[in-house]
Amino acid sequence: MTQTSVNPTGVWAWIWQRITAVLLVLLLGAHMVVLHFVPANLEIQFIGVAARFKSILYLIIDSGLLVFGMYHGMNGVRNILFDFAFANKWRGAINVVMWIVIIAYSVWGAYALTFFLK
Amino acid sequence: MRLITRERYIGRGLGMWAFWLHRLTGLAIIFYLLMHVIVISTVVGGDKNFDAAMKTLKSPIFVLLEMGLLATIIIHGLNGIRIVLFDVGIGVKHQKEIFIAMMALGILPFLVGFAIAWPHIFGS
C-alpha cells in the first residue's frame, strides 16, 4: 500500500473504495441482469417496478447501490481532482462538496424509491 | 494543469492505458449515475410522470447510448476486479496479460446485452 503515502484522501477512503468496488460488482451485476437481461422486465413501467418492490429486498438492494455508487463515484472524482496541483488549496472545499453531493443524492434517491412502495 | 503525481499519468504501455481507461470510464459512469437518480426520481411526481420518462428512454437513440454505458460499466468493473486483485497481492507481475484477459471476458456479456437491445435500436 505504498500508494497511500502520496494519497491525500487517507487509508480509510482507499479501503472503502475497495469495499464498495466489490459490492458494486456484485450488486450492479445483479441490478443489470434483473432489469435488462430478463425478458419479462424489459418494458420498464411503474406498475412493474412497484410489483418488484413488494419484496423489500429490492428497496434494500437499490438503496445500497445508490449509497455505494455515490460514494465510490464521488470519491473517485475526488481522487482525480487531488492528482492536480490546483486542488491543493481547495481540498477542504472539495471534501465538503463531495459529502454534500453524496448525502443529498442518497437521501433524495432513497426518498424517491419509497414511491414505488405504493 | 500541473499534476502532483506526474509519473502516475505520464507512463507508457498497456498498464498506462488501463489506468486512463479506468479514470475516463469512472467519470462517465458517475455522470450517468447523477442523471439516473434524477430520471428515476420522476416517480416523485406520480406514476404517469415516471412512465412518460421511461417511454422517452425507450427510443432507439437512448438504447444505443445504453450500449455505450454497458461497455463502459463492463470495462470499469472488470478492470476494477484487476485492481483489487493487485491490492491483495495477486497478479501484479502479469498485469498486462490480466488486462487483456479481463477485456476478453467482457466481450460476451456485451454481445448478449447488444443482442437483447438490437430490436429496440434497429427494429425487429
Image (tube, coloured by chain):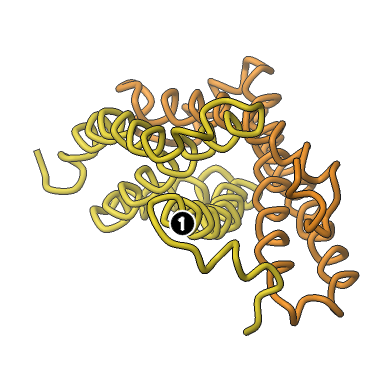
Chain colours: A orange, B yellow
Subunit bearing disc 1: B
Q: Quadrant of residue B75?
A: top left
- Which amino acid, by three-letter code, is at mark 1? Met
Residue at 26% over, 58% down? B61
Q: Quadrant of residue A78?
A: bottom right
Residue closest to the eye, A76 or A4: A4
Expressed as whole percent of the image width and height from the top left, the position of residue B73 reads: 44, 43
Say whether residue B7 is left or right of residue B105. right
Residue closest to the eye, B89 or A77: B89
Expressed as whole percent of the image width and height from the top left, the position of residue B54 reads: 42, 47
Q: Assign a secondary structure to mark 1.
A: helix
Residue at the farthest left position: B124
Residue at 62% over, 28% down? A22
Expressed as whole percent of the image width and height from the top left, the position of residue B98 reads: 41, 32
Q: Which residue is mark 1?
A: B16
Q: Categorize mark 1 by other alpha carbons within 10 Å: few (<14), some (14-19), many (20+).
A: some
Residue at 45% over, 31% down? A32
Residue closest to the eye, A17 or B67: A17
